[in-house]
Image (cartoon, rainbow, N blue to C red):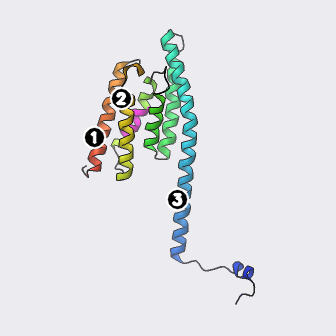
Amino acid sequence: MCKLSTDCDRIPQAPDLQSVRFLWGLSLFEYSKGAIRRAALISEVIQEWVGLHLKAFFANSYLGGPFVDVSEKLARNTCHRMKDLCLAAQSYSVFFDRIRSLSTLGSVYLDPVEEPLCEVISRLSGIKQQPRIAGKTKSAAQALASATADRVLWLDQSVNLTVQFRLQELQSALEKSLKGGK
């Protein structure tokens, strides 16, 4: 029997399998939660950078500046980085929300986000999601489709049509997934 409570704390307890599994699961959950939080914060900063690049792309396109191609490439590459962070954290709806908020900045063309956006849509079309996540992703895709439908947000209207078509495909696939179909 322990004489002092501090002596009892020093005696190693033989862990049972259930306790070990619980601690293991808890540590994985906390690690994942931290990774998602960290990715969300970093992607928020990168979203600001993408917004600045999109504004530069708009200004260069509007003025016929010599750096149209460079500003488009910078916006696209930065958006790819934001996409990679969101995909690593499996935060698909966060990525769609980030793109949607970029559409509200004013004086931007969204053409450079087409490639990373379509990559996310392609990835999502090929995986089965839990109903809660599929519903959240579908809602974010719907909001993105309505926010980006305005023709003034696109320099090339064929890019707008491609994005809208791909978002509609994704919404249909997610709706089918939510109903239990393949």
The label shown at residue 172 is 1
Between the C-alphas of marks 2 and 3, the distance is 35 Å
Badge 2: how crowded within 10 Å, few (<14), some, or many (20+)? many
Q: Residue furthest top?
A: 64
Against 30, residue 70 (above or below) is above
Counting residues from the start of the chain, the first of labels 1 and 2 encountered is: 2
From the viewer's perspective, tell me whether residue 138 is left or right of residue 42: left
Badge 1: how crowded within 10 Å, few (<14), some, or many (20+)? some
The reply to whether residue 123 is visible in this rendering is no
Picture quadrant where residue 24 is located: bottom right
Between the C-alphas of marks 1 and 2, the distance is 14 Å
Residue 74, given in percent of the width and then of the height, sits at 54, 25
Residue 75, given in percent of the width and then of the height, sits at 51, 26
- Residue 136 colored in magenta in the image: no
Q: Which residue is mark 3?
A: 29
> The residue under label 1 is which amino acid type?
Ser
Which residue is at a point 35% across and 47% down the rendered structure image?
135
Q: Which residue is mark 2?
A: 163
Magenta span of residues: 116-123
Between the C-alphas of marks 3 and 1, the distance is 31 Å
Badge 3: how crowded within 10 Å, few (<14), some, or many (20+)? few
Picture quadrant where residue 111 is located: top left
Q: Please name whichever residue, 14 or 172, is drawn nearer the observer in this view of the structure.
A: 172
Residue 35, given in percent of the width and then of the height, sits at 55, 50
Which residue is at a point 36% across and 24% down the rendered structure image?
160
